[in-house]
Image (cartoon, helix red, strand yellow):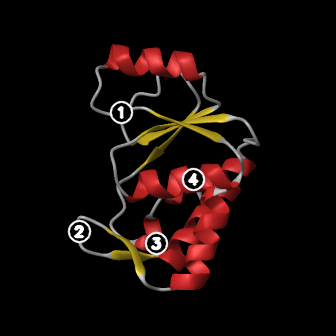
Amino acid sequence: MLGLITRGAAQRFGMTPAYISPAGWPLSYQELDQISDEVASGLSARGLKLGDVVSLLLPPGLEYLVSYVGAAKIGAITAGVNYRLTANEQLAILNNADPKLVITTVGGDSFGFPAVELTEADSLNNLSAEIR
């Protein structure tokens, strides 16, 4: 459903900003749709499919947004893990969620689960590049 909503918003609002990064560069609805498609393809290429759990151990921001929408587009279940929790609390959530993949920041702890580490984007070109 979220994938369809994102696609519809892209068709309706095109290059209107959907999100503006803290650094001030915009992500349009059209770019959100395109990049989340690429993230969805990257997740599929890693073997994720409908019903698989993807944990997002990321701070709020563009990486979280495109990862969440990309996972939704393949029908994956997202389990957000608050990056401000203690390591023990994060581990408890991950053990409960049992994700097929953890998407985290570079240097983030995936607690032994398969992971993709994202660098903080400084432009649309490298936004979630590690998973696209």
Q: Distance from label 2 to label 4 (Cα)?
A: 22 Å
Residue 131: tell me if it is visible.
Answer: yes
Sequence order check, earlier mark of 3 and 1: 1
Kindly report which numbered mark, 1 or 4, lies closer to the viewer in this rendering.
Answer: 1
Residue 38: tell me if it is visible.
Answer: no
Identify which residue is drawn at 59% across, 30% down: 114
The residue wearing badge 2 is 23
Kindly report which numbered mark, 2 or 3, lies closer to the viewer in this rendering.
Answer: 2
Q: Distance from label 1 to label 2 (Cα)?
A: 22 Å
Kindly report which numbered mark, 1 or 2, lies closer to the viewer in this rendering.
Answer: 1
Task: Give the x, y percent position of residue 115.
Answer: 54, 35
Q: Quadrant of the C terminus?
A: bottom right
Q: Distance from label 1 to label 4 (Cα)?
A: 20 Å
The residue wearing badge 3 is 125
Identify which residue is drawn at 47% across, 28% down: 110
The residue wearing badge 4 is 131
Q: Amino acid at mark 1?
A: Asn
The residue wearing badge 1 is 82
Task: Give the x, y percent position of residue 36.
Answer: 58, 62
Q: Amino acid at mark 2?
A: Ala
Identify which residue is drawn at 60% across, 55% down: 70
Is residue 120 placed above or below 38 in the rendered structure? above
Horizontally, residue 92 falls left or right of residue 85, namely right
Task: Give the x, y percent position of residue 32.
Answer: 52, 70
Sequence order check, earlier mark of 4 and 3: 3
What secondary structure is found at the residue carrying circle 3?
Answer: helix
Is residue 42 placed above or below 51 in the rendered structure? below
